[in-house]
Image (spheres, rainbow, N blue to C red):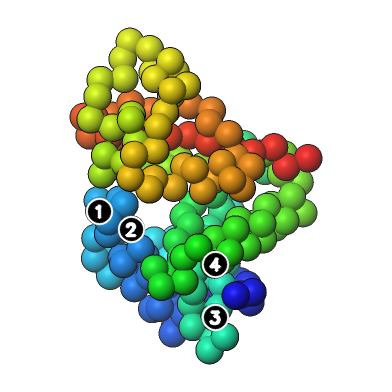
Amino acid sequence: MQPTIIDLTADQTDLIDQTAVLVVDGFRDFAPKAWPTLDDARAEVHESFAEDRISRVALDDHGRVAGWIGGIDQYDGYTWELHPLVVRADLRRRGIGRALVADLEAQVRARGAVTLYLGTDDETNRTSLAGVDLYPDPLARLAQIQNRRGHPFTFYQQCGFVLVGVIPDANGIGNPDILMAKRLI
């Protein structure tokens, strides 16, 4: 499926509501603490309309939200954070996530970005970094990371991102945030 990707704006209430549902459903299994309610998800969507942000949605053939990606300007525009990315469960593994990432890369590159980075949490023990004490040498553990249960870090690697760090216990003891980045020039 080749999605249509457009800006998500504050006046598109139906698309905002669809996106909020997508966020709750899409993160429930991977990051259950992130946006557990529709109100939390709507607030996140509305935050994406700030001046220093990009908010884009992929639409399916019927004009429904198939995926959402956001970007946050960091480091005076040289670096942008990819936050968040979510694709409807019934449409995963069809190129929508890759299309959204490529679209965001083009959007931030046009604004002068050199680097795109992200944090991908492991709140549900999907990698070899979860449930263990990463200290005293978290980078040695990161160098030997294994994907045990479908963690999205391998998706991002396939999109050209590389592992650049880890924040041990970012989401509570044993639940790290895995940092990844990609050079855009």
Q: Which is more foreground, mark 4 or mark 2?
A: 4
Query: x, y (%) of residue 78?
Result: 69, 39
**Reading the chain from its start, which is encountered first: label 2 or label 1?**
2
Picture quadrant where residue 4 is located: bottom right
Residue 178 in picture, x, y percent from top left:
42, 34
Sort mark 2 into few (<14), some (14-19) or many (20+) by Cα contacts within 10 Å.
Answer: some
Determine the CA span between mark 2 and mark 1: 6 Å
The residue sitting at 28% across, 70% down in the picture is 38
**Residue closest to the far top:** 136
Disc assigned to residue 32? 1
Q: Along the line of sight, which residue is nearer the eye, 24 or 74? A: 24
Q: Amino acid at mark 1?
A: Pro
* Residue type indicated by callout 3: Asp
- Proximity of marks 2 and 1: CB atoms separated by less than 8 Å: yes
Q: Earlier in the sequence, mark 4 or mark 1?
A: 1
Instruction: Please give the count of numbered marks on the rendered protein.
Output: 4
Element type at mark 2: helix
Which amino acid does the dot numbered 2 rest on? Phe
Q: Select label 3 or label 1 by which is in front.
A: 3
Are there few (<14), some (14-19), or many (20+) residues within 10 Å of tag 1?
some
Dot 3: element: loop
Q: From the image, tell me which residue sits under label 3.
A: 60
Kindly indicate whether the residue at mark 2 contacts the one at mark 4 (C-beta within 8 angstroms).
no
- In terms of secondary structure, where does tag 4 sit? loop
Q: State which tag comes first along the sequence, 3 or 2.
A: 2
In the rendered image, is residue 111 in sight? no
Mark earlier in primary sequence (4, 3):
3
Q: Earlier in the sequence, mark 3 or mark 1?
A: 1
Closer to viewer: mark 4 or mark 3: 4
Residue, disc 2: 27
Residue position for label 4: 94
Q: Quadrant of the C terminus?
A: top right
